[in-house]
Image (spheres, rainbow, N blue to C red):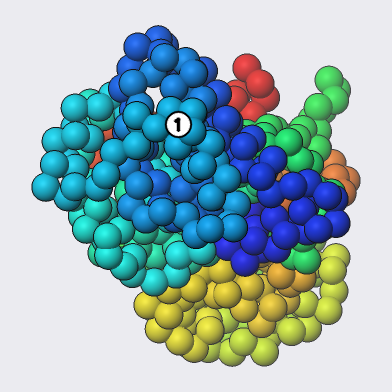
Amino acid sequence: MKVVTADQMSELDRLAMSDYAIPGAVLMENAGRAVVDFMRERYANLGSKSVTILCGKGNNGGDGYVAARHLRLLGTQVRVIMLEPPTEGTLAAVPYKVLCKTCPEVLVPLDLTTLRPTVEASDFVVDAMLGTGLNCAPRSPYLEVLQALEALPDTVQRIAIDIPSGLDATTGQTFGAVFRAHHTVTFGYAKWGFYLQSGADCIGKVQLANIGFDWDRIPLPIPCQLSTLSTMQAVWRAVRFAGSDAHKGDFGHVGIVAGSKGMVGAPALTAKAAQRSGAGLVTVFTPQSAQPTLAAKLNEQMTVPLEEESGSLSEAAYDTLVKYAERMTVLCVGPGLTTSPATVQLVHRLLKEIPKPIILDADGLNALAQNPDVAQERAQNSRFPLIITPHPAEAARLLGTQTADVQSNRIASVQSLSAKYGAVALLKGKNTLIANPDGEILVNSTGNAGMATGGSGDTLTGIIGSLVAQAVSSGSSVPLEQVTALGAYLHGLAGDIAAQAVGRASLTAGDLIDYLPKAIRQLEGE
């Protein structure tokens, strides 16, 4: 599923009408009918229910008028509350006039004093007030209506047409009051605002409706994709070697440069996650003083003690790492490392000189932020790619800005990270974003708030490292950003399955590893 901004969708609508001769009235008729088709498929006995539809004056309202007419044909009890009449000569004026002629009894004037009880007495409320063009606070009477409808009981099913009113389709920002839908029936493509800032809290479940035009006929300048189960299943099949005579060497060897004295939990989680998600071999390189404790926490994974200074890896460990790196398929660098000066220098040398794919996380990212130039040489060699996986605060350090700036425009932030460091960039958070240096973006659709717990990022690093190792070992041609997106999807899917089993409040990073097998079985179609 592609994801677009409000401006892109507006341009796609224009091109569909101008270049492909699809009348706007036909698209509107199909959109309104698609909403009713969704309701019929989702809910039984729709003809015996009551529906209140709130219509604005624009195209979104026009979709609502069409839906009202088709619902009325089913025998449904329909009320249409018109906040403003459509302007004469606009697309929305056509279905409004048809409704006035065919079933004028459904039109009910707006009365703010009785609006909420009217809606609460309905089985459904359909939002057709404001479409994808909103980018500021709704004006009167839309604001008052949205405020009146806040915190409706769940006995009233809430359905938004195209986008919940009050939500910015591009940024995901809300403006004091917003329609909180159980379902959003959207057209063309999903909108960026669904996955940014407050958007995910407003949209409910998204249904992409067919309104009679193949939107893929119109190319987008920078494709943005939503990771779905079907697309990630295809990536998994391309990454995972499936030969019946396979041996552990066919699934890659993940090297993990991580840990410090008193910080062995992070590398342990990374190592276990890498093994559990399919890596053939996993070796952790850690300071001498931390190695015995780390080894005691691991079973299937190997550990190698390295030179240190005061419990943290020193630059003297480089020569040992170089020898071992020849056997590695990929290196994961960062979890639990610390940012002692000697460790930072070691990370810089690894980035500049080790000819292996590197996944950089945690203190590895903090080391990179101290000298961004070390990524440039690596960026010039596509055989040894770099993947960076910052959370918003780490991203701010890498970009020389503030966390609030990163979060206020996550799309631009992840694109800037990828371009600046010549890397595949993964920006963690609700609906994690993945970008490549060409500006292409993938949006992750799995995960939940229970995963905001210590060690969750370490498990993600291990999963991505494992998948990259398998992709390299199998000779897969899948782009690295898709392999990274698969890691984010698998990580979030394991979190969603774990949350169902143990509850979000009790979720730990160890649970993510425990439920990886069930998540992988879904990828395998079991």
**Residue closer to the observer: 366 or 206:** 206
Count the labels in the image. Answer: 1
Task: Give the farthest residue toward the left.
Answer: 113
Q: Quadrant of the C terminus?
A: top right
Residue 294 vs residue 377: left or right? left
Q: Quadrant of the N terminus?
A: top right
- Dot 1 lies on which element? helix
Please name the residue that numbered disc 1 is placed on: 68
Quarter occupied by residue 245:
top right
Quarter occupied by residue 141:
bottom left
| Callout 1 amino acid | Ala
**Residue closer to the observer: 434 or 513:** 434
**Residue closer to the observer: 348 or 302:** 348
Q: Residue at x 43, y 73 (%)?
A: 408
Q: Position of residue 165 (x, y in %)?
A: 39, 53
| Picture layout, residue 403 above or below residue 24 | below
Q: Residue at x 49, y 28 (%)?
A: 102
Q: Residues within 10 Å of mark 1 (few under 14, many from 20)?
A: many
| Picture layout, residue 214 above or below residue 42 | below
Quarter occupied by residue 248:
top right
Residue 184 vs residue 333: left or right? left
| Picture layout, residue 488 above or below residue 437 | above
**Residue closer to the observer: 489 or 506:** 489
Can residue 358 be seen in this snapshot?
no
Q: Position of residue 493 (x, y in %)?
A: 50, 36
Q: Position of residue 374 (x, y in %)?
A: 68, 85
Q: Residue at x 44, y 69 (%)?
A: 135
Residue 430 vs residue 19: left or right? left
